[in-house]
Image: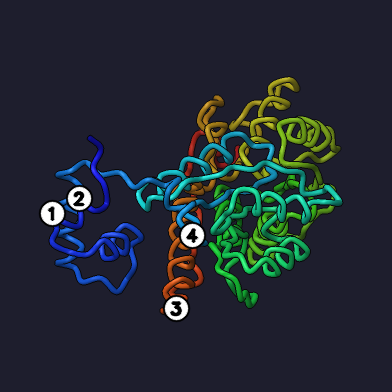
Amino acid sequence: MKSTIKDVAQLAGVSIKTVSRVINKEASVRSDTIEKVNQAILRLNYEPNLAARNLAGTRSYTIGYVYDNPNAYYVIDMQNGILAECKERGYELVIHPCNSNSPSICEELESMVAKSQLAGLVISPPLSEMPEVLEALAAMDLQFVRIISGSGHRPESTPCIFVHDHEAALHITEHLIGLGHRKIAFISGDKGHRSTDERYNGYQEALKNAGIEANSDYLYEGQYSFETGVKGAKQLLNLSSPPTAIFACNDEIAAGALFASRLMNVAVPEQLSIAGFEDSPFSRQTWPKLTTAAQPTNIIARKAAELLVSQIVAQRTGKGKGVLHQHFEPDLVVRESTQRIQQ
């Protein structure tokens, strides 16, 4: 027969309530008690009945991930990271794709939260940057964690995972400048995404620090897509004075720029250096492989879920909110798509 929480409590010599507190990782349980309960769980191969927990009262043990992102690699990494933390914490995960441009997005989220009886949400850009969405979630008295681009300099009262895109973009551009490039173009992602602004500002700061005047001809505005990379690179390489390097706002754009360069018989990296951002599979499936900034999406997602569950537990126990913010700075990864400019 399947073991029950009562069996675990009896084997560990504690109350059922204590077992529940250990499973929910409440901070007030003594370490030796946690050890006894975990040993009993292992011996009995006990698995919490999540459906029963959710039906037992007002406490839900289901969290949601809501997103609007066309990048399948990003979404899969986010889902896997959140799911890994949910499994460890004994929570279920509801995944909800949506259209952030929908005029009824707030009503859609309210309905989804109510139907799924969610305890909290993880939200990623652009939803995590939309004031109307944040206001709607706050009005529901729902715990949520935002993944946003930035360094935390702006005051944020809600729990956030900050991704330091500005600093990473600055380092990528500095890398290109260090290779002797002065004519460095930038192909942007979607307007209105904070990541686009942060990466562009990092690029601009590096140029300014090096005494390089920004050239508006070297800016191509697009979306986070392969097609943007193709169109942007074609336009840039057809200039009378084309760039010697392109910094693309993500790896998918960079892969498109690399494809366009091949079509135009421009050798990469001999005639043109290309760098991307995120270290997605796009950066490793191209030839040459792309210089990029490694953004650990899976880890970021897991930390967001960990932060969310800690906020849910803190709300239920009334024992403070703990850590509200965590930070990640993507690391520069130098590969074969960039090299020193040929004089």
Q: Which residue is mark 3?
A: 318
In front of the other: 178 or 201? 201
Q: Nearer the viewer, residue 31 or 199?
A: 31
Q: Are marks 2 and 4 in contact (CB under 8 Å)?
A: no
Secondary element at image label 2: helix
| Residue that mark 4 sits on | 57
Identify the amino acid type marked 3.
Gly
Name above or below for residue 136 compared with residue 112.
below
Which amino acid does the dot numbered 2 rest on?
A: Asp
CA distance separating discs 1 and 2: 6 Å
Counting residues from the N terminus, which is met first, the one under dot 1 or under dot 4? 1
Packing grade of label 3 (10 A; few <14, some 14-19, many >=20) is: few
Q: Amino acid at mark 4?
A: Gly
Is any part of residue 97 visible from this angle?
yes
What secondary structure is marked by label 4? loop
Q: CA distance from mark 1 to mark 3?
A: 29 Å
Task: Please indicate whether residue 221 sits to the left or right of residue 29 in the image.
Answer: right
**Residues at marks 1 and 3 touching, judged by CB atoms closer than 8 Å:** no
Query: Marks 4 and 3, how far apart in space?
Result: 18 Å
The residue labelled by disc 2 is 7
**Which badge, 4 or 3, is on the more N-terminal residue?**
4
Residue shown at the point (78%, 39%) measured from the top left: 242
Dividing the image into 4 quarters, which one contains the C terminus? top right
Label 4, residues with CA under 10 Å away: few <14, some 14-19, many ≥20: few
